[in-house]
Image: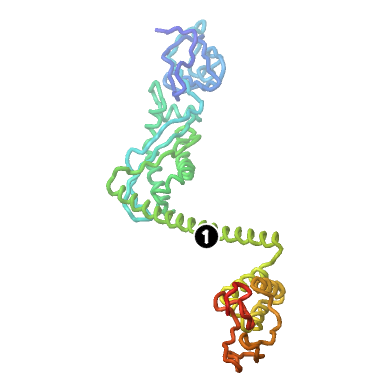
Amino acid sequence: MAHIADVIKYEGDNSTFIWKHPCEDFNALTQLIVHESQEAIFFMNGQALDLFGAGRYTLETQNIPLIGKVLNRATDEKTPFHCEVYFINKTEQMSIRWGTDSKVQFIEPTYKFPLSIGANGEMSLRAEDSRKLLLKLVGTENYLGQQKLVGFFRAFLMTRIKTYIAQVVKANSINIFEIDENLTEFSNAIKELLVGDFAEYGIALEKFFVTTIVKPDGDPQYEKFKELHFRQYADIAEAKLRQQTDLIEAQTDAEKTIIASKALAAKRAQEGYTYQQERGFDVAEKVAENEAVGQFTNMGVGLGTMAGVGGAVAGMVGGTMREAVGAVGEVAPPKALKCTNCGMPLAAGTKFCPECGTKVVLACPKCGTPVNGAKFCPECGEKL
């Protein structure tokens, strides 16, 4: 019995690839509406006849050329006939998840450990050849959704993905802890391997992503392997850190030395003397410490030592010495010595008066001031 329908249009959702309208054997004057993102295939008596793009159609033999070849017009063109309409969703369907159903077994190339890993990710698919997709995959079923489509291709996915990842890891000696750095390369290469498999069934593989490599966390063997790996790199990192710290400390010490040198140079410039002059001051200070003024029995030697500091500071050293000596009495040319007891003139170097035997005193025994035969010390007043 004929089923009269006014309008036939798509009533599926965006996760659907192919949807069959439930109305069959509709009247020839029924309206068919196809949206921009869809195509519709008209079946009659089990044959896929016409393919409709976007638009509104009145299902008459005049508008369906292939029907006219197999159907004789009946009176008033209202004779019902057995027919079906399938809608194909042409939009790109994204975020279709996939994952390996078992682990990939391989030998880790760096440490030669046997390991098992899995992989998962997402892809986007689009129905490209409606007729091929419908005839090869759907057949007489009423619906083809994302999960069912992925199920059809699971064998391709698992074989390609597992084989490729194991081969690339081995060929490029990719460490298990560096494998995530290669996800982009994995994604692009696996997509190229799968494009032909999907295209054979009228599906375009638009994008393919490997988002996660599933490592065997919790496996005792893997945990030991992971500990060994990270301990090795931790030791290297610690050694580098120690080396950097030592270098920074050495640089700090050098900077302190440079700063101190600059400060000292600025001080010299401000006070009006140079490094050579400062060294002359140091020598004069040492001579003053090691040669008591009272012991300058031979001033020529002391001054000669000071003069040897250098031409640039000789004058300053000599002045320094004159000031030091002037503090205890000016050094004058030696006078003729006389005995403090009898007044007898004495020759240089005489220790006792040849006339009365009195001891000749050249320096104060108390403070060491030169007295040149005086009876009292001109510095401390000690009786000689």
Q: Quadrant of the C terminus?
A: bottom right
Residue ID at (55%, 58%) = 251
Q: Residue at x 71, y 77 (%)?
A: 311
Q: From what the image shows, is residue 142 above or below residue 343?
A: above
Residue pictured at 44% horizontal, 24% vertical:
15
Q: Residue furthest bottom?
A: 354
Is 174 drawn above or below residue 20 in the view shown? below
* The quadrant where residue 83 appears: top left
Q: Is residue 320 left or right of residue 359?
A: right
Rendering coords of residue 312 (x, y %): 71, 74
Residue 364 drawn at (x, y percent): 58, 78
Tell me where residue 211 sits by quadrant: top left
Label 1 neighbour load within 10 Å: few <14, some 14-19, many 20+: few
Q: How many numbered marks does the figure carry?
A: 1
**Quadrant in which residue 281 is drawn:** bottom right
Q: Say which of 346 and 63 sits in front.
A: 346
Horizontal side of 161 relative to 371 (left or right) equals left
**Relative to 206, does residue 359 appear above or below in the rendering?**
below
Q: Name the residue at the top extreme.
A: 76
Task: Using the image as rendered, state which of residue 40 and residue 264 is in the foreground.
Answer: 264
The colour scheme used to paint the residues is rainbow
Q: Nearer the viewer, residue 139 or 259?
A: 259
Q: Looking at the picture, how far across and down is residue 184, in whole percent?
A: 48, 43
Tag 1: residue type?
Ala
Report helix, strand or loop for mark 1: helix
> In the image, is 127 to the left or to the right of 292?
left
**Residue toward you, 73 or 371:** 371
Query: What residue sits right under mark 1 in the picture?
Result: 250
The N terminus lies in quadrant:
top left
Q: Where is residue 6 shown, x and y percent of the image?
A: 49, 7
